[in-house]
Image: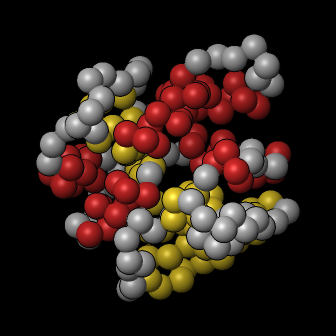
Amino acid sequence: MAKLVYGLSQSLDGYVDHMRLGPPVPAAFRHFLELVRGLTGFVYGRRMYEVVRYWDDDLADWDAQDRDFAAAWRSRPKWVVSRSLKSVGPNATLFADDVETMVRGLKAQHAGEIHVGGPDLARTLTDLGLIDEYRLYLSPVVLGGGTPFFAGPRPPLHLVASDLIADGLIRLTYVPA
Protein backbone atom coordinates (compact mmCIF):
# COMPACT_ATOMS: atom_id res chain seq x y z
CA MET A 1 0.00 0.00 0.00
CA ALA A 2 1.32 3.43 -0.94
CA LYS A 3 1.87 6.19 1.58
CA LEU A 4 0.29 9.55 0.76
CA VAL A 5 2.61 12.46 1.65
CA TYR A 6 1.83 16.17 1.57
CA GLY A 7 4.97 18.25 1.48
CA LEU A 8 5.83 21.73 0.25
CA SER A 9 8.35 24.45 0.91
CA GLN A 10 6.91 27.17 3.05
CA SER A 11 7.91 30.37 4.77
CA LEU A 12 8.53 30.52 8.51
CA ASP A 13 5.10 32.08 8.89
CA GLY A 14 3.41 29.18 7.07
CA TYR A 15 2.85 30.38 3.50
CA VAL A 16 3.57 28.56 0.24
CA ASP A 17 4.52 30.68 -2.74
CA HIS A 18 7.23 29.23 -4.97
CA MET A 19 7.72 32.55 -6.77
CA ARG A 20 8.29 34.53 -3.59
CA LEU A 21 10.31 31.80 -1.85
CA GLY A 22 12.61 31.58 -4.85
CA PRO A 23 14.45 28.58 -6.26
CA PRO A 24 16.05 26.12 -3.85
CA VAL A 25 19.78 26.35 -3.21
CA PRO A 26 21.80 23.67 -5.07
CA ALA A 27 21.94 21.24 -2.11
CA ALA A 28 18.17 21.49 -1.65
CA PHE A 29 17.62 21.08 -5.39
CA ARG A 30 19.64 17.82 -5.27
CA HIS A 31 17.49 16.67 -2.34
CA PHE A 32 14.29 17.30 -4.29
CA LEU A 33 15.72 15.59 -7.38
CA GLU A 34 16.49 12.44 -5.39
CA LEU A 35 13.09 12.64 -3.71
CA VAL A 36 11.29 12.76 -7.08
CA ARG A 37 13.38 9.89 -8.44
CA GLY A 38 12.15 7.72 -5.57
CA LEU A 39 8.45 8.57 -5.79
CA THR A 40 5.67 6.39 -7.09
CA GLY A 41 3.82 9.43 -8.43
CA PHE A 42 2.02 12.70 -7.70
CA VAL A 43 -1.56 13.74 -7.04
CA TYR A 44 -2.13 17.38 -7.93
CA GLY A 45 -4.92 19.87 -7.70
CA ARG A 46 -5.44 22.08 -10.75
CA ARG A 47 -3.54 25.15 -9.58
CA MET A 48 -0.47 23.23 -8.44
CA TYR A 49 -0.50 21.13 -11.61
CA GLU A 50 -0.49 24.29 -13.72
CA VAL A 51 2.60 25.46 -11.80
CA VAL A 52 4.56 22.21 -12.10
CA ARG A 53 3.78 21.79 -15.81
CA TYR A 54 6.79 24.06 -16.17
CA TRP A 55 8.83 20.82 -16.18
CA ASP A 56 7.00 19.46 -19.25
CA ASP A 57 8.90 21.70 -21.66
CA ASP A 58 12.66 21.85 -22.16
CA LEU A 59 13.92 25.41 -21.85
CA ALA A 60 17.10 26.66 -23.50
CA ASP A 61 18.46 28.26 -20.31
CA TRP A 62 18.24 25.06 -18.22
CA ASP A 63 21.42 23.58 -16.83
CA ALA A 64 22.13 19.86 -16.43
CA GLN A 65 20.47 19.78 -13.01
CA ASP A 66 17.25 21.29 -14.40
CA ARG A 67 17.21 18.74 -17.21
CA ASP A 68 17.77 15.89 -14.72
CA PHE A 69 14.92 17.11 -12.55
CA ALA A 70 12.59 17.48 -15.54
CA ALA A 71 13.41 13.93 -16.70
CA ALA A 72 12.73 12.51 -13.23
CA TRP A 73 9.47 14.46 -12.86
CA ARG A 74 8.25 13.49 -16.34
CA SER A 75 8.93 9.82 -15.64
CA ARG A 76 6.52 9.73 -12.69
CA PRO A 77 2.79 9.31 -13.16
CA LYS A 78 0.63 12.25 -12.24
CA TRP A 79 -3.03 12.15 -11.26
CA VAL A 80 -4.72 15.54 -11.56
CA VAL A 81 -7.92 16.41 -9.72
CA SER A 82 -9.86 19.11 -11.56
CA ARG A 83 -13.36 19.84 -12.74
CA SER A 84 -12.24 22.73 -14.96
CA LEU A 85 -9.35 21.19 -16.91
CA LYS A 86 -10.33 19.32 -20.05
CA SER A 87 -6.97 17.65 -20.63
CA VAL A 88 -3.60 17.12 -18.98
CA GLY A 89 -0.08 16.63 -20.25
CA PRO A 90 2.05 13.55 -20.80
CA ASN A 91 2.08 10.82 -18.16
CA ALA A 92 -0.89 12.44 -16.40
CA THR A 93 -4.44 11.27 -15.81
CA LEU A 94 -7.34 13.63 -15.17
CA PHE A 95 -9.95 12.95 -12.48
CA ALA A 96 -12.95 15.22 -12.08
CA ASP A 97 -15.09 13.42 -9.54
CA ASP A 98 -14.90 11.28 -6.40
CA VAL A 99 -11.39 12.15 -5.27
CA GLU A 100 -11.78 9.91 -2.23
CA THR A 101 -12.37 6.76 -4.27
CA MET A 102 -9.60 7.69 -6.70
CA VAL A 103 -7.00 8.29 -3.97
CA ARG A 104 -8.00 5.22 -1.95
CA GLY A 105 -7.60 3.20 -5.16
CA LEU A 106 -4.16 4.67 -5.87
CA LYS A 107 -3.01 3.89 -2.34
CA ALA A 108 -4.29 0.32 -2.61
CA GLN A 109 -2.85 -0.32 -6.10
CA HIS A 110 0.63 1.10 -5.58
CA ALA A 111 3.58 0.83 -3.21
CA GLY A 112 5.99 3.56 -2.18
CA GLU A 113 5.20 7.25 -1.79
CA ILE A 114 2.66 9.29 -3.66
CA HIS A 115 3.05 13.02 -3.10
CA VAL A 116 0.17 15.46 -2.86
CA GLY A 117 0.64 18.87 -4.47
CA GLY A 118 -1.53 21.80 -3.49
CA PRO A 119 -2.95 23.09 -0.21
CA ASP A 120 -6.60 22.91 -1.27
CA LEU A 121 -6.34 19.30 -2.40
CA ALA A 122 -4.34 18.49 0.74
CA ARG A 123 -7.13 19.97 2.86
CA THR A 124 -9.69 17.75 1.15
CA LEU A 125 -7.50 14.68 1.60
CA THR A 126 -6.77 15.62 5.23
CA ASP A 127 -10.49 15.95 5.92
CA LEU A 128 -10.95 12.46 4.44
CA GLY A 129 -8.15 11.05 6.63
CA LEU A 130 -6.08 9.99 3.61
CA ILE A 131 -2.77 11.79 4.20
CA ASP A 132 -0.26 9.58 5.98
CA GLU A 133 2.55 12.10 6.42
CA TYR A 134 3.12 15.87 6.27
CA ARG A 135 6.52 17.29 5.32
CA LEU A 136 7.01 20.97 5.98
CA TYR A 137 10.13 22.35 4.32
CA LEU A 138 10.79 25.57 6.24
CA SER A 139 12.63 28.29 4.35
CA PRO A 140 14.21 31.12 6.38
CA VAL A 141 11.85 33.70 4.90
CA VAL A 142 8.80 35.53 6.28
CA LEU A 143 6.24 36.27 3.56
CA GLY A 144 3.60 37.96 5.70
CA GLY A 145 0.71 36.52 3.72
CA GLY A 146 -0.34 34.39 0.81
CA THR A 147 -1.56 30.83 0.49
CA PRO A 148 -1.14 28.93 3.76
CA PHE A 149 0.41 25.44 3.83
CA PHE A 150 -2.69 24.28 5.72
CA ALA A 151 -5.75 25.49 3.81
CA GLY A 152 -7.99 24.64 6.77
CA PRO A 153 -7.54 24.06 10.47
CA ARG A 154 -4.26 22.31 11.24
CA PRO A 155 -4.98 18.65 11.92
CA PRO A 156 -3.64 17.11 15.14
CA LEU A 157 -0.08 16.06 14.29
CA HIS A 158 2.83 14.26 15.90
CA LEU A 159 6.41 15.25 15.02
CA VAL A 160 8.43 12.20 13.93
CA ALA A 161 11.55 13.77 12.40
CA SER A 162 13.42 16.99 11.75
CA ASP A 163 16.24 17.25 9.24
CA LEU A 164 18.54 19.96 7.96
CA ILE A 165 18.23 19.56 4.18
CA ALA A 166 20.47 22.43 3.12
CA ASP A 167 21.73 25.69 4.52
CA GLY A 168 18.64 27.30 5.98
CA LEU A 169 16.12 24.65 4.78
CA ILE A 170 14.69 22.39 7.48
CA ARG A 171 12.25 19.54 6.94
CA LEU A 172 9.78 18.77 9.69
CA THR A 173 7.97 15.45 9.28
CA TYR A 174 4.65 14.86 11.00
CA VAL A 175 2.10 12.06 11.06
CA PRO A 176 -1.54 12.39 12.08
CA ALA A 177 -1.85 12.17 15.88
For residue 116, above or below residue 60: below
Query: Who is closer to the viewer here, 12 or 43?
Result: 12
Measured as percent of width and height from the top left, residue 28 is found at: 75, 52
Q: Quadrant of the C terminus?
A: bottom left
Residue at figure coordinates x 26%, y 69% from the top left = 127
Quadrant of residue 70 in the image?
top right
Q: Quadrant of the N terminus?
A: bottom left
Residue at figure coordinates x 67%, y 45% from the top left = 19
Q: How many marks?
A: 0
State whether residue 4 appears in this view.
no
Quadrant of residue 6 in the image?
bottom left
State whether residue 59 appears in this view.
yes
The single residue placed furthest to the top in the displayed view is: 60
Measured as percent of width and height from the top left, residue 101 is found at: 15, 51
Q: How is the image coloured?
A: secondary structure
For residue 143, above or below residue 88: below
Quadrant of residue 161 in the image?
bottom right
Residue at figure coordinates x 72%, y 29% from the top left = 66
In the image: residue 170, left or right of residue 120: right
In the image: residue 3, left or right of residue 64: left
Residue at figure coordinates x 23%, y 67% from the top left = 128
Measured as percent of width and height from the top left, residue 77 is found at: 40, 33
Measured as percent of width and height from the top left, residue 137 is found at: 64, 64
For residue 56, above or below residue 131: above
Query: Who is closer to the viewer here, 67 or 95?
Result: 95
